[in-house]
């Protein structure tokens, strides 16, 4: 009896000490400028989803205040601002840092690359996250990076007319993201990387002729269908797109183990939620586009997909030859994908042909 009482007292004491330790944690307020408006499903809504829950998950020791694009920091300045400590956190996509680090694009979206399950497998259980953090460290950025959202394939462009051959692309001005933009440039397209809110005005004024941005339910909110009617699939350039929560490393190192774990678990939950949510809302928007918005949903011919793929393979070799950081990440991803192919080729049913 006395032994049981002693054990009970020890358990209660340990729980009390743990509770006291959590209560003694210095509260952390993450002020998070974001690259995408919170009204955009999966792009900006995910960080709001985290912010609405992280206080409860942490018993109030971690809170998050989200700032819409340009309210605190411009989207393309978030990395520098977090690294310098101007803000203590930021939510964006690594593909925006291609001009600073070519390898960054491989942590955002890969043309003809892995779909979300394979991408997450490499990120979390291959060398992806290790290489991701190393990239920032080796380039002098004082940030701790978390994979904190993912969406499935995007559409690969909104055009004014059908595209039946690569020659039609030459001379075109188009908003295009990431490594896919390099592919389009190699085909004679002049590309620009505009933030989401600037795309419609650029189309309307004729500053660009065509655009890609995201998934149908997201693109519809930006009104592209009002100006350009030919929406092309599949999203060869972005079969999966990931998003990052960056925290200033000094702030991160000052957080308790409990607080760090809350952030990590919140991001992992956000990855699952963002993928499921954005998958669930596309087909209703596609139906509306067809029946109400006058959109022509097009599918690239095998000939055009071959043109894009061959151009991409050339771009890969050029980047590998010119940038050691890109080569290191690409080679690791390619090796993982080669191994994964054994599983993928046996485990999944073949997709029905169109």
Image: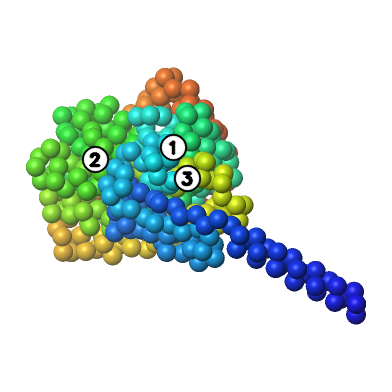
Q: Residue 83 carries which label?
A: 1
Question: Residue at the location (21% across, 31% down)?
Answer: 189
Question: Callout 3: helix, strand or loop?
Answer: strand
Along the viewing direction, whichever of 123 and 309 lies nearer the viewer: 123
| Residue with the mark numbered 3 | 247
Along the viewing direction, whichever of 62 and 352 lies nearer the viewer: 62
Question: Callout 2: helix, strand or loop?
Answer: loop
Side (left or right) of 104 relative to 308: right
Cβ–Cβ under 8 Å for marks 2 and 1: no
Side (left or right) of 339 relative to 233: right
Question: Residue at the location (17% across, 34% down)?
Answer: 173
Question: Residue at the location (56% across, 46% down)?
Answer: 254
In space, the residues marked 3 and 1 are separated at their CA atoms by 8 Å
Residue 349 vertical position relative to residue 313 in the rendered view, above or below? below
Along the viewing direction, whichever of 81 and 335 lies nearer the viewer: 81
Residue 295 in view, yes or no: yes
Q: Which of marks 3 and 2 is in front?
A: 3
Q: Where is residue 191 in the image (x, y as percent from the top left)?
A: 23, 33
Q: Where is residue 35 in the image (x, y as percent from the top left)?
A: 33, 47
Q: Position of residue 67 (x, y in %)?
A: 33, 53
Q: Residue 194 carries which label?
A: 2
Cβ–Cβ under 8 Å for marks 3 and 1: no
């Amino acid at each position: 009896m006395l032994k049981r009482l002693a054990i009970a007292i020890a358990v209660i004491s340990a729980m009390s000490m743990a509770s006291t330790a959590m209560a003694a944690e210095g509260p952390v307020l993450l002020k998070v400028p974001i690259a995408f408006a919170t009204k955009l499903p999966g792009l900006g809504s995910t960080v709001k989803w985290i912010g609405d829950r992280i206080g409860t998950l942490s018993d109030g020791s971690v809170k998050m205040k989200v700032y819409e694009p340009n309210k605190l920091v411009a989207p393309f300045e978030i990395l520098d601002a977090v690294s310098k400590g101007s803000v203590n956190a930021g939510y964006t996509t690594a593909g925006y840092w291609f001009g600073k680090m070519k390898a960054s694009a491989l942590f955002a979206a890969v043309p003809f690359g892995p779909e979300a399950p394979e991408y997450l497998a490499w990120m979390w259980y291959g060398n992806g996250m290790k290489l991701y953090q190393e990239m920032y460290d080796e380039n002098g950025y004082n940030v701790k990076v978390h994979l904190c959202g993912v969406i499935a394939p995007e559409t690969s462009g909104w055009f004014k007319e059908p595209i039946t051959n690569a020659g039609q692309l030459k001379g075109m001005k188009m908003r295009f993201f990431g490594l896919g933009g390099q592919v389009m440039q190699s085909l004679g397209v002049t590309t620009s990387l505009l933030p989401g809110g600037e795309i419609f005005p650029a189309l309307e004024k004729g500053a660009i002729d065509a655009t890609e941005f995201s998934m149908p339910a997201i693109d519809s909110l930006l009104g592209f269908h009002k100006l350009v009617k030919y929406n092309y699939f599949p999203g060869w350039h972005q079969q999966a797109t990931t998003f990052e929560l960056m925290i200033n490393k000094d702030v991160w190192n000052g957080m308790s183990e409990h607080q760090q774990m809350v952030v990590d678990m919140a991001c992992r939950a956000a990855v699952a939620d963002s993928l499921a949510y954005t998958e669930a809302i596309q087909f209703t928007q596609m139906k509306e586009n067809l029946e109400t918005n006058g959109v022509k949903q097009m599918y690239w011919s095998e000939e055009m997909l071959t043109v894009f793929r061959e151009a991409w393979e050339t771009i890969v070799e050029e980047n590998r030859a010119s940038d050691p950081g890109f080569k290191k990440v690409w080679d690791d991803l390619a090796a993982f994908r080669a191994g994964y192919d054994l599983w993928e080729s046996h485990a999944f049913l073949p997709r029905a042909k169109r």
